[in-house]
Amino acid sequence: MSKAINNNTENISFWYDPDKRSVMYQIGAACLFVFVAWYLVSNTMTNLEKQSIATGFGFLNTEAAFEIGESIIEYSAADRYMRALWVGFLNTLLVSFIGIILTVILGTFLGIARLSKNWLINKCAAVYIELFQDIPILLQLFFWYAFFYETLPSPRDAVNPFSGLFLCNRGLIFGIPQSHPVYKYMAIALIFAVIIIFFMKKWAKKRQDLTGKTFPVFYTSITLIIGLPFVCWLIGGAPTEMSIPVLKGFNFKGGMSISPEFAALLLGLVLYTAAFVAEVVRAGIQSVNRGQTEAAKAVGLKSGQVLNLIILPQALRVIIPPLTSQMLNLTKNSSLAVAIGYPDFVSVAGTAINQTGQAIEGVMLIMVVYLIFSLSTSVFMNWYNKKMAIVER
């Protein structure tokens, strides 16, 4: 019987064999893709050659000849395009990193508030979510930008709630500690404290599994995070000198300032994305069986303990995947910074394109940079998702 089936299979015509046809279709699709790609590239290169436009990334080593209003690292117009783009990259990374942290904190708080039994808290959270979800992010950025430049006073009439803090149309200006070598060692001590806490949490969990005894990880962690840098500060002479901003001429000197563009971009991104994160958190919490809450309260756990120990750990498996998407959305929405004048990577790359005419290379760099941001965020969140997954026994 099996021999007869094999003979029938061998007698099937090539074009009537679905397996062979599928291979041919795939080869044809691949050839078509290669042909279209070759046509587009060759046509583009021909047109660029006719217009005497150079190709390649050699322009990155030429002088940029333009200033950037806001930079984490030192930069001047005499630097190369490579450094200018690096400045834009770091600016995008800074606003995205801070924005993601603030968004997760605010979104989690709003998501929990949305489920509060307190009528006022519940409705306030609902109004916030509906309001900020329904207003386009670009309009929100324009609003906060106009708020800083049109509503706030000039530096001479800056709002000064207390000594060392000023709010005006030049941004937020505040005092910071004067530069001192001891602060470098305090930062090292802080990193060392975080490493100790990481291994301490593992040890405490293993100890609890073996003996049933709990260890005060939270209070010990707070003590380490505050205590080690504080000890370094005391050993270093306990410096207390501050760099206080002082009005000189038309602007403040000293201290540290947060520009209106950065503040408007950060506020817009955080407030907008947090509204979506709040709904993600609310859905995750509601996915946990209500019996879990009732059982936790039956053994004497308080509401805060029920949330932290029972509900949120189980809700994370539902929260993390859509939360990752919102993080990616925030990073990609940061490209709208060009609309309010913040020098992110898109803005700097756009200036480089206008000056050099290297449009293809510039757009390619923008695509690669945002691909790197997206993939790195996805890799980290996928790792965290696997780490927080509930392992069934």
Image (cartoon, rainbow, N blue to C red):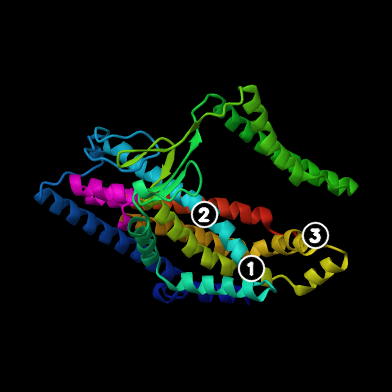
The Cα–Cα distance between marks 2 and 3, rounded to whole angstroms, is: 34 Å
Quarter holding the N terminus is bottom right
Q: Which mark is residue 393?
A: 3
Label 2, secondary structure: give it.
Answer: helix
Q: CA distance from mark 2 to mark 1?
A: 20 Å
* Residue type at numbered disc 1: Ala
Whether tag 2 and tag 1 are in contact, CB under 8 A, the answer is no
> Comparing marks 2 and 1, which lies closer to the viewer?
1
Q: Which residues are magenta?
A: 339-365
- Is 361 within the magenta? yes
Left or right of 102? Residue 190 is: right
Q: CA distance from mark 1 to mark 3?
A: 34 Å
- SS assignment for the magenta stretch, majority: helix
User: Could you say where residue 36 lies in the image, as x and y percent from the top left?
Assistant: 26, 61
Q: Which residue is mark 2?
A: 100
Identified at 70% across, 74% down, the residue is: 117
Query: Mark 1 vs mark 3: which is more N-terminal?
Result: 1
Q: Name the residue type under label 2.
A: Ile
Q: Position of residue 321 (x, y in %)?
A: 57, 62
Q: Residue at x 35, y 65 (%)?
A: 29
